[in-house]
Image (tube, grey):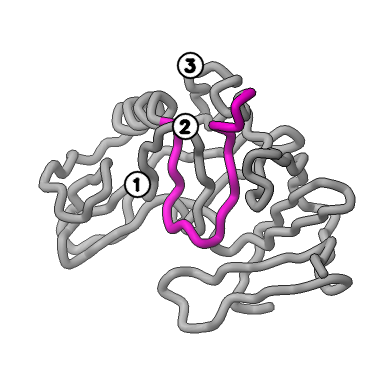
């Protein structure tokens, strides 16, 4: 039997405490939740699709067509949420636009060594892991989810780099688990909504 309601809360990547899964009546959204319609795609019934409308970078709206996030008539495209995919993947034209704007707003030197396998990396100033980066907001139909920097930047002090935990995809976009850290993610299949509540997951 498929649960009509379930929630999970993913702890930080560097946290030793386990993440939390709540089923049925235990999965309750709170008043401060950011709620957005949960979409379905008959061609991909096992995926949960989100109503993403834009991703402002540092307060700047990206020049992209909103329809780029829609599911096509043939079932391709759209934006799914997936706790099993590590980083967020955006349709290539969207990622390229975001990448260009993110780099232009950053006061850090680009690292082009490709040592991490991620597309956008910056050299960390010596003796630091704290850097200023542009704010990222996922603008969903129904509300804005502003992410803390640790939910989209991955720092590696040994390599001396900090990288944007996002990449390009062809067609379908994926909201990955790095971006879902310390957020209570509530699925309500009866109301056909998904909601996000910033939460210290290791304290649940």
Q: Position of residue 138 (x, y in %)?
A: 58, 38
> How many residues crowd around disc 3 within 10 Å: few (fewer than 14), some, or many (20 or more)?
few
Q: Which residue is mark 3?
A: 63
Q: Is residue 78 left or right of residue 192?
A: left
- Res 40 quadrant in image: top right
- Over which residues does the magenta segment extend? 73-91
Q: Which mark lies nearer to you, 2 or 3?
A: 2
Residue sitting farthest toward the left:
113
Name which residue lies at 67% across and 67% down: 8
* Residue at 23 percent of width and 40 percent of height: 108
Q: Which residue is mark 2?
A: 171
User: How far apart are the alpha carbons under marks 3 and 1?
Assistant: 20 Å
In the depicted view, which residue is nearer to us: 65 or 152? 65
**Mark 2 to mark 3: distance in Å?**
18 Å
Q: Looking at this view, is 44 or 176 the one in front?
A: 44
Q: Which mark is residue 164?
A: 1
Q: Residue at x 66, y 64 (%)?
A: 199
Q: Where residue 90 sits: x, y (%)?
A: 45, 36
Q: Is residue 7 left or right of residue 149?
A: right
């Amino acid at each position: 039997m498929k649960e009509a309601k379930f929630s999970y809360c993913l702890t930080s990547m560097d946290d030793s405490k386990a993440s939390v899964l709540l089923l049925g009546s235990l999965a309750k959204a709170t008043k401060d939740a950011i709620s957005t319609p949960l979409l379905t795609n008959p061609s991909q019934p096992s995926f949960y699709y989100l109503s993403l409308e834009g991703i402002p970078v540092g307060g700047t709206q990206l020049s992209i067509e909103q329809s780029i996030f829609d599911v096509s008539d043939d079932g391709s495209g759209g934006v799914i949420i997936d706790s099993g995919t590590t980083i967020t993947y955006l349709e290539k034209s969207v990622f390229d636009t975001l990448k260009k704007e993110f780099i232009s707003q950053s006061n850090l030197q680009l690292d082009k060594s490709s040592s991490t396998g991620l597309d956008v990396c910056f050299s960390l100033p010596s003796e630091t892991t704290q850097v200023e980066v542009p704010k990222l907001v996922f603008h969903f139909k129904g509300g804005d989810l502003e992410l803390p920097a640790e939910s989209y930047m991955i720092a590696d002090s040994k390599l001396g780099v900090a990288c944007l935990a996002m990449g390009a995809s062809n067609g379908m976009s994926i909201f990955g688990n790095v971006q879902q850290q310390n957020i209570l993610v509530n699925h309500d299949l009866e109301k056909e909504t998904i909601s996000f509540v910033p939460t210290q997951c290791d304290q649940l």
